[in-house]
Amino acid sequence: MLPNLQVPPIHIIGLELHLFGFLVGLAIILGTILAGRRAKQFGISERVVADVAIWAVVAGFIGAHLYSAIFYFPEKVAADPLYLLKLWDGISSFGGFIGGTLGVLIYFRRHKELPFLPYADTIIYGFAFAWIFGRMGCTTAFDHPGSLTDFVLGMDYQGLWDKDLQQWAITPGVRHNLGMYEFFWAIAMSIFFFFNRHKTHFKGWYLGVFVVCYMPVRFAMDFLRKADIHHFGLTAGQWAAIVLFVLGIILLVRGAKKGDLLVPDGEPKYRPAGEMKALSKAEAVKAAQPVGAGHGKKKKKR
């Protein structure tokens, strides 16, 4: 059994700071930086990647709460429909993933001149590394307690008390820390992506591989989420995992058949027209300069 790793909040100048929030913020920053670097390797627009990241984060947080409220806490929505607007109260990683994806799709719907898959591959590459810190936050918060267990990685859980019903919503005991298991998975996925960073794959490969590798893991772990509401024998997360897994397989099969490669050669491509025009102009100016120009005057010999 592992000891409880929950870290109490720190109070500074009247503010309550949680380690979970810090790690999630760190994940967003790290993911955006790594996606930007990956964009440079692919030769696509770093500015577009930064814009897409903002859309993904904002839509992701909205989707995370709405998914959690509708599928995991429908009784709260029925009692108070305004609960849907309380974005700070309850989130779901699956909802965040779906919401973030929808946000990205909306962005590319507004910018039809840009291809979706090269940028999606870039974002998901950074997201894999960001997931490590996001799930590290879940591990320390122990906000995804599983069923009671005698497994060696089981963790001492202090329980969740329902103040309204005055009873245990989740009883104390040694339970699976599902956030920690996904933390381990994120490390493995990131290592796999890292060792593929110089290889050439078809467009959509990173996105498809991430989805196909993650969904079976999430589907299996949800059998340990005894506190979740079940729909026809499965959790909302499991139903979503099935749909996304099928879509991931379709993406990989179509991508392999089409063979449209995304080469990490650093050559400018798939950028907004304004950026491509500016790059072409800069290259033309550079080519027009005489050889050796710009290196300053040579010093006179004494």
Image (cartoon, rainbow, N blue to C red):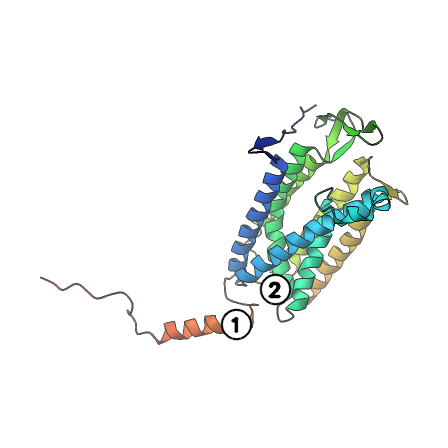
Please name the residue that numbered disc 1 is placed on: 274
Please name the residue that numbered disc 2 is placed on: 261
Q: Position of residue 189 (x, y in %)?
A: 64, 45
The amino acid type, in three-letter code, at marker 1 is Gly
As helix, strand or loop, the secondary structure at mark 1 comes to: helix
The amino acid type, in three-letter code, at marker 2 is Leu
Q: Quadrant of residue 207?
A: bottom right
Q: Position of residue 53 (x, y in %)?
A: 61, 55
Q: In the image, is 215 to the left or to the right of 130?
A: right
10 Å neighbourhood of mark 1: few (<14), some, or many (≥20)? few
Locate the C terminus and report the quarter of the image it occupies: bottom left
Q: Is residue 16 above or below residue 299?
A: above
Q: In the image, is 35 to the left or to the right of 117?
A: left
Locate the N terminus and report the quarter of the image it occupies: top right
Q: Is residue 161 above or below residue 36?
A: above
Residue shown at 76% from the left, 45% from the top: 216
